[in-house]
Image (spheres, helix red, strand yellow):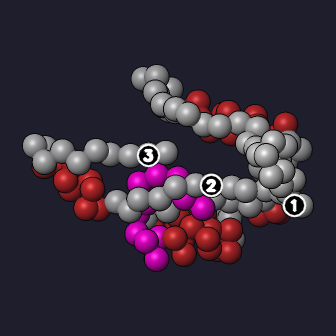
């Protein structure tokens, strides 16, 4: 989860806090959960628990992302050169601004409905500073 601690000593941090929305991403998938017994045993529990995450980008490696994306998508059997295949996928695009969404649509050749959810988040909450769905 993305979190920025308030720091009144640095004006740029205050501006960031004022400009960007706050959000979190949680996905729950399942049906017919197994409920714990009265003694508290049994029942479902998370298979994985995220305790800490960090991100570091190695200098001058930003161009590698597109290559990795192509590799991952093609290993899933999707041809990214085919507009129909691209538009058959679901997209969760960072709602950082209209220009970002317009650029993703244009570069990827996506139909407008593919970024509709991201545009709704942008319209309702503004530029989100972290994961949201």
Q: How far is mark 1 from mark 3, CA to CA?
A: 29 Å
Query: Quadrant of residue 86 in the image?
Result: bottom right
Q: Residue beneath label 1, please?
A: 31
Q: Residue at x 62, y 55 (%)?
A: 26
Q: Secondary structure at mark 1?
A: loop
Q: How far is mark 3 from mark 2, CA to CA?
A: 13 Å
Badge 2 density bin: few <14, some 14–19, many ≥20, Cα 10 Å = few
Q: Assess whether mark 1 and mark 2 are in contact (beta carbons under 8 angstroms).
A: no
Q: Nearer the viewer, residue 32 or 110?
A: 32
Considering only order in the chain, which callout, 1 or 2, is on the residue closer to the N terminus?
2
In this rendering, the answer to whether 50 lies above or below 2 is above
Q: Residue furthest front?
A: 39
Q: Residue at x 28, y 44 (%)?
A: 5
In this rendering, the answer to whether 103 lies above or below 61 is below
Image location (x, y in percent) of residue 132: 54, 58
Q: Nearer the viewer, residue 103 or 94?
A: 94
Image location (x, y in percent) of residue 11: 13, 49
Q: Residue beneath label 2, please?
A: 26
In this rendering, the answer to whether 29 lies above or below 54 is below
Image location (x, y in percent) of residue 93: 58, 58
Q: Secondary structure at mark 2?
A: loop
Q: Secondary structure at mark 3?
A: loop
Q: Nearer the viewer, residue 88 or 132?
A: 132
Which is the main secondary structure of the residues drawn in magenta? loop
Please tell me the numbered disc located at residue 2: 3
């Amino acid at each position: 989860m993305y979190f920025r601690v308030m720091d009144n000593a640095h004006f740029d941090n205050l501006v960031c806090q004022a400009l960007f929305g706050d959000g979190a991403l949680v996905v729950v998938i399942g049906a017919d959960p197994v409920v714990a017994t009265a003694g508290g045993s049994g029942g479902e529990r998370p298979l994985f628990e995220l305790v800490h995450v960090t991100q570091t980008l190695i200098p001058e490696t930003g161009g590698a992302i597109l290559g990795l994306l192509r590799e991952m998508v093609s290993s899933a059997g999707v041809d990214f050169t085919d507009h129909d295949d691209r538009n058959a996928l679901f997209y969760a695009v960072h709602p950082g601004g209209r220009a970002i969404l317009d650029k993703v649509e244009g570069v990827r050749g996506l139909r407008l409905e593919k970024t509709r959810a991201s545009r709704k988040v942008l319209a309702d909450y503004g530029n989100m500073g972290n994961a949201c769905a």
